[in-house]
């Protein structure tokens, strides 16, 4: 009889612990890293570019140079003052979970099902009310 009472007293706390553990939220996941890009190696161990890769690199450099020149030209033009609009970051979608995103400030998972893309929202579990972000 005593062994029966002892086992009941032990099973109840273990059941509560298992139940509470199953209700815990997912831990924050870091953003997936980008795979490193490598160049093909020459037989002597040096990295080299193919003609196509070199052409693409030259085109990218030229586009960057033209963008920088255009930006410098824009700086020289008089600009009408515009009201300061706060810029909000866009959340990243959780891979494999439609309707869930990572809060860009705390990296917590947030349920945004029913909120349209581009809309401003905030994480209800984030204590800082200024941490607003856009739904991707």
Image (cartoon, rainbow, N blue to C red):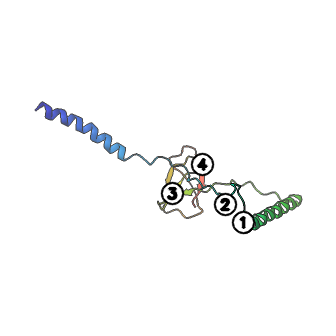
Which dot marks residue 40?
Answer: 2
Q: Are marks 2 and 3 in contact (CB under 8 Å)?
A: no
Quadrant (top left, top right, bottom left, bottom right) of the C terminus: bottom right
| Chain-order first, disc 2 or disc 1 | 2
Position of residue 49 in the picture relative to residue 132 (left or right): right
Q: Residues within 10 Å of mark 4 (few under 14, many from 20)?
A: some
Q: CA distance from mark 4 to mark 1?
A: 46 Å
The residue beneath circle 4 is 131
- Mark in front: 2 vs 4: 2
* Circle count: 4
- Mark in front: 2 vs 3: 2
Q: CA distance from mark 2 to mark 4?
A: 43 Å
The residue beneath circle 1 is 50
Depth check, front residue: 59 or 64: 59
Q: CA distance from mark 1 to mark 3?
A: 36 Å
Please say if 124 is above or below 9: below
Q: Are marks 2 and 1 in contact (CB under 8 Å)?
A: yes
| Chain-order first, disc 4 or disc 1 | 1
- Mark in front: 3 vs 4: 3
The residue beneath circle 3 is 94
| Chain-order first, disc 2 or disc 4 | 2
What residue is at 82 percent from the left and 60 percent from the top? 68
Please say if 126 is above or below 1: below
């Amino acid at each position: 009889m005593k062994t029966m009472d002892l086992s009941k007293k032990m099973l109840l706390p273990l059941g509560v612990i298992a139940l509470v553990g199953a209700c815990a939220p997912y831990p924050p996941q870091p953003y997936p890293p980008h795979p490193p890009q490598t160049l093909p190696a020459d037989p002597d161990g040096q990295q080299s570019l193919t003609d196509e890769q070199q052409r693409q690199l030259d085109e990218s450099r030229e586009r960057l140079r033209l963008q920088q020149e255009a930006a410098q030209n824009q700086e020289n033009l008089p600009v009408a003052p515009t009201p300061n609009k706060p810029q909000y970051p866009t959340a990243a979608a959780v891979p494999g979970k439609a309707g869930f995103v990572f809060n860009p400030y705390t990296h917590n998972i947030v349920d945004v099902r029913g909120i349209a893309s581009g809309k401003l929202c905030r994480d209800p579990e984030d204590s800082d009310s200024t941490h607003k972000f856009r739904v991707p």
